Image (cartoon, rainbow, N blue to C red):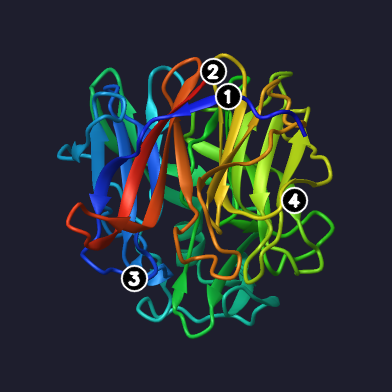
Amino acid sequence: MSSTPKIKMDEPVVVALSAPHEIRWGFTQFPAYSPMPDGRILIIYADAEDASETHGEPAPSFTSSDEGKTWVALKDGLVPARPHFSVSPAYDGEFLVVPSLHYFNVKEQGIAVPEPIAESFVYGPLYTYRVSDFDPKVFAYFSQLDARRWLPSSGKWEDEKVAYDTENLLAWRRKDSDLLPRAFFERPVLKHKGELLYADYRVRYAMSDGHIPSKGGTDLMASDDNGHSFKHRATVCVDRTGEDLYGEPALEETADGGLICVMRKSDHEQKPLVMNFSSDAGQTWSESEILAEFGVFPFLIRLPNGPLIVSYGRPGVWIKINEDALGKNWSDPICIIKGDPNEIGQHTCGYSSMHVLGPNSFLLTYSDFDYHTTEGVPHKAILSRRIELS
């Protein structure tokens, strides 16, 4: 554990408020930043039940042109979708979006569901299938992802299909659900040594030895054509016993040119955040090491002057700093919002996002379930906060 660097935190800026007295889970939470092609900062959040049936609907969206000091509703042609959404800078000045959408409904399409090849329990019973065992319509659905690409030559967003690797691909669905969820990019892709890399936990693949990860895991997807297609490169981490989740991955480049991937282990119980490392562009990965005692939806950034920052939460919201950007020696946790270990979802959803502003500064967004207006009325709030390292 390294010493904690000195930081300066500005007062949080209110981006959005829920209806008064809102307490429903999924509403006014899960905020995330993205860079826009014109230099604005985008922030989106969810405002619906946290369920697959609500994915793909338009998400409340705001932009800032002054580094997060003020926010206005998004009014241009991009339509972010919930529950998570990311605009990724690609190469050649392009930007890529692979959004969530309404999932394939096997009942509505009259598609027979084969026998599952594995079962698990992730907030309810979950069944796993081979995509190759389904009707060809399902194969097409998984192999071509709807996307949008911003081209500097036209200055516009254009629709396209991104080819996604289907070799050994698995599908899953929840009990009593007719939906087959598929991959979407809820984090920015990482530009690394001429490729685009994405750590994906919504997609699933059978392993090379035939093992079926019943609870999923994290897989590294790689593109050598600027995001027009992605191939499965390696499994970053999976629990062969089916006990731990290893999901919600955050991927960044380390100072020595390697990769670090931070993942959530927990589903029903509080478990540590873990990190895995690769020194060969994600072909192979180290064994997991503990980064924090708990946490969901970690987010990673690397500042231009060097340090890695990770944000995480539930309970509360926290950040840790790794000054040499090698990913090993992290500071003590710095509290943004305190949380109750016995009521982990009481004060905030714990999901967060960051956006680099300058060599030593960044924005942090998170939800605050205990926000009160000047009149004393309680709301959930989406907050954005500037933080600077001394």
Residue at 30% of width from left, 22% of height from top?
39
> First in sequence: mark 3 or mark 1?
1
Spatial CA distance of label 2 from label 3 is: 37 Å
In percent of width and height, residue 95 lies at 38, 29
78 shown above or below 166: above
In percent of width and height, residue 52 lies at 42, 68
Residue at 35% of width from left, 79% of height from top?
108
Residue at label 1? Answer: 6
Location of the N terminus by quadrant is top right
The answer to whether residue 118 of the structure is visible from this angle is yes
Mark 4: amino acid: Cys
Q: Which SS class for mark 3?
A: loop
Spatial CA distance of label 2 from label 4 is: 35 Å
Location of the C terminus by quadrant is top right
Q: In the image, which disc is placed on residue 237?
A: 4
Residue at label 2? Answer: 390
Mark 1: amino acid: Lys
Q: In the image, which disc is placed on residue 23?
A: 3
> First in sequence: mark 4 or mark 3?
3
For the residue pair 48 and 156, the one nearer the viewer reads as 48
Mark 3: amino acid: Ile
Q: In the image, which disc is placed on residue 257?
A: none
Labels 1 and 2 touching (C-beta < 8 A) = yes
